[in-house]
Amino acid sequence: MRILLVGEYSRLHNSLKEGLTALGHEVILVGDGDGFKQLPTDHSIEPLFSKNKIVNIPRQALFRIFKYDLAKLERGLRFYFLLKKLKGYDVVQLINEAPVKTTPGFEKRLLARLFKQNKKTFLLSCGIDHISVRYMLDDKLRYSLMDPYHADNSNAPHYRYIFDYLSKSHKKLHDFVFANISGVIASDMDYYLPLEGHPKFLGLVPNPINIEKLDYIKPEITDKVIIFLGINRGTYVKKGIPFFEKALEIINQKYGRKIEIVVAENVPYSQYINLYNKAHILLDQVYAYDQGFNALEAMAKGKAVFTGAEKEFNNYYGLTEKVAVNALPNVNSIAAELSSLIENPAEIIAMGKRARAFIEREHSHLLVAGKYLEKWGMSE
């Protein structure tokens, strides 16, 4: 079967491609590399011209004055010139309802042609989209990544792109996409909850993790507990990183030489995935109910990960023991959880083993690829 994956977030489509390819399918991935992460693609729509130093100066000026980014136009044009190659696929899956990341009107025209020249198209909900933003703003969650915006208006610049999903132009794109897809799939509980009851919702398929590329690293805790924090400046506020930083200040004052804190910022994926190998604890994100890709890959390596692990997640998978630490938007709570692990290093090791077993059981890229085939109606 021929499968086209459009767009990429945090290596999700790359891992799915590896699983589908191993099962004997032909898979092509189109994307922009997901920014500084520089994730691999078969056909790139990365806006290289817009990143040129000479072009970047007028680009920045244009954005400051008109809030328009030339990179959006370049992505769209690159995708347009690829369209003649993107035809005749049995299944097309979009990473988002705006997978090309160009202007809504241009995106609609590009997707219209993509829909027309292929068989079935499915949508993946694994990041911000119209439905998830609307759900958060309707206060249907106990907490969400919108909380910093509501608490402090100075955070508004961090949320500009999120509110774009509620614009009239994007709503038209959203409606158009949903009118043309065969179904929408959620990658975890954060997107499952907003989609419950939607007529085109096909259910949850866990993020695919290529466990063949991620070895379990048995923790060796001698004199220090090593804590790793990876920072993406683009999602700094929305991931709740300030809570981690303040909790680490408390922990550093309390334990000093008993711990080592490692911080990495805006690192390409190929480097990032190995930076935390020696760490025992990884701090991922706060405003989540389930784990995203970074957390899952760290769990596969046997780390004790602070991330989303709410009751909805535990109930869905029938878990009775922690496979990750549920990081709440509360500095003292995070500091207390860190203290508990630092003082009980055996639990770090035990949690890491449970985390690896959970990933093997629920997130193996081969198992998940098979589930996608079922959702697409392509399984034998």
Image (cartoon, rainbow, N blue to C red):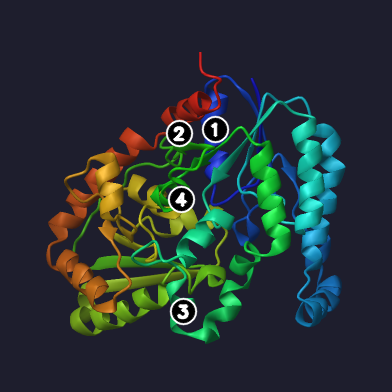
Residues marked 3 and 4 touching at CB (< 8 Å): no
Whichever of labels 1 and 3 marks the residue nearer the N terminus, that label is 1
Mark on residue 18? 1
Is residue 230 positioned above or below 183 on the image? Answer: below
Is residue 155 positioned above or below 194 on the image? Answer: below
Looking at the rendered structure, the secondary structure element under dot 2 is helix
Closer to the camera: disc 2 or disc 4? 4
Amino acid beneath label 3: His
The residue tagged 4 is 191
Q: x, y percentage for residue 267?
A: 55, 63
Looking at the rendered structure, the secondary structure element under dot 4 is helix
Amino acid beneath label 4: Tyr
Callout 2 crowding tier (Cα within 10 Å): few <14, some 14–19, many ≥20? many
Q: CA distance from mark 3 to mark 2?
A: 38 Å
Residues marked 1 and 2 touching at CB (< 8 Å): yes
Q: x, y percentage for residue 51?
A: 78, 66
Q: CA distance from mark 2 to mark 4?
A: 20 Å
Callout 4 crowding tier (Cα within 10 Å): few <14, some 14–19, many ≥20? many
Is residue 263 positioned above or below 297 on the image? Answer: below
Q: x, y percentage for residue 353?
A: 23, 45
The residue tagged 3 is 150
The residue tagged 2 is 365
Q: CA distance from mark 1 to mark 2?
A: 7 Å
Whichever of labels 2 and 4 marks the residue nearer the N terminus, that label is 4
Callout 1 crowding tier (Cα within 10 Å): few <14, some 14–19, many ≥20? some
Is residue 347 positioned above or below 328 on the image? Answer: above
